[in-house]
Image: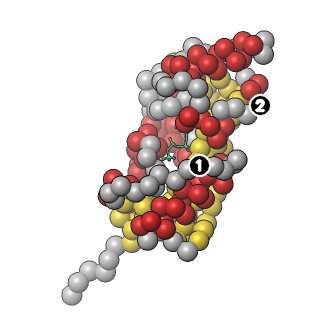
Amino acid sequence: MTAPDPKRLLVATTNAGKLREIRAILADLPFTIATLADYKALPEPEETGKTFAANARIKALAYAGATGELTVAEDSGLEIDALDGEPGVRSARFNGESYAEKFATIAHMLEERGTESSTARFVCALVLTQPDGVVWETTGVVEGRLQLPARGQGGFGYDPIFYYPEYGRTLADVTDAEKAAVSHRGQAFRRLRDYLAS
Ligand code: ITT
């Protein structure tokens, strides 16, 4: 007797920080987790959407179409209220090669607007697709505020400047589990886990 094929889910992201967090949340799901590293030379879709959800759909549909897999993709980023929501959907490609440069750009832009801080949020739009279309989607949001200079060694991306009031620390200054418990990505992927487990 042969065992039935385990269910497979392609987590379609090129971002190692995202992948690490997503793997931890989906660890107990009875699915084999595939990643883009399991495929050779998949073209990266252009993120032309104006919203997180639009970009997540573009990525999920492109990778599901290219691989034939049940695929989840997410688009995420930081919205800073004093900067009218910047960097938003441009978070990954925002001014500056390194995050130290991106943080300096943000500090400069805030200074030009006569402030040092601002309320801010991380947003994560998650889209689950089959090759022939969207199956399910959700969005997670975590509210906080900017803290400059940067603080903490954990997490990735903008975490060192994102202060989470309930913890009294930045999301780079807490454990991975503490970040996941409250983060935009934690919320969205726990909902996905519950959806796929039901
Ligand atoms: P994929 O599109 O391949 O998933 P990406 O990094 O290009 O990878 P996005 O276009 O969604 O992904 O950009 C998300 C950016 O938003 C990410 O590169 C960080 O700069 C920022 N970001 C998102 N979630 C974050 C988090 O939990 N902590 C810190 N920064 C985050």
Decide which of tag 1 and tag 2 comes sooner along the chain: 1
Residue 161 occupies which quadrant of the picture? top right
Q: Position of residue 94 (x, y in %)?
A: 59, 30
Q: Position of residue 173 (x, y in %)?
A: 49, 25
Q: Position of residue 70 (x, y in %)?
A: 47, 68
Q: Position of residue 145 (x, y in %)?
A: 68, 26
Indicate whether 115 appears above or below 23: above
- Considering every residue shown, the one lying at the far bottom of the view is 1
Q: Is mark 1 within 8 Å of ligand 1?
A: yes
Q: Are marks 1 and 2 in contact (CB under 8 Å)?
A: no
Indicate whether 101 appears above or below 140: above
Q: Nearer the viewer, mark 1 or mark 2?
A: 1
Can you identify the residue that label 2 sits on?
84
Badge 1 crowding class, 10 Å Cα cut-off, few under 14, some 14 to 19, many 20 or more, is some
Disc 2 residue type?
Asp
Indicate whether 83 appears above or below 134: above
Say whether residue 143 is left or right of residue 29.
right
Under circle 1, the secondary element is loop
Under circle 2, the secondary element is loop
Q: Is residue 194 visible?
A: no
Closer to us: 28 or 31:
31
Closer to us: 101 or 182:
101
Q: Residue sitting at 44 percent across and 65 percent down?
A: 66
**Quadrant housing the N terminus:** bottom left
Which label sits on residue 47?
Answer: 1
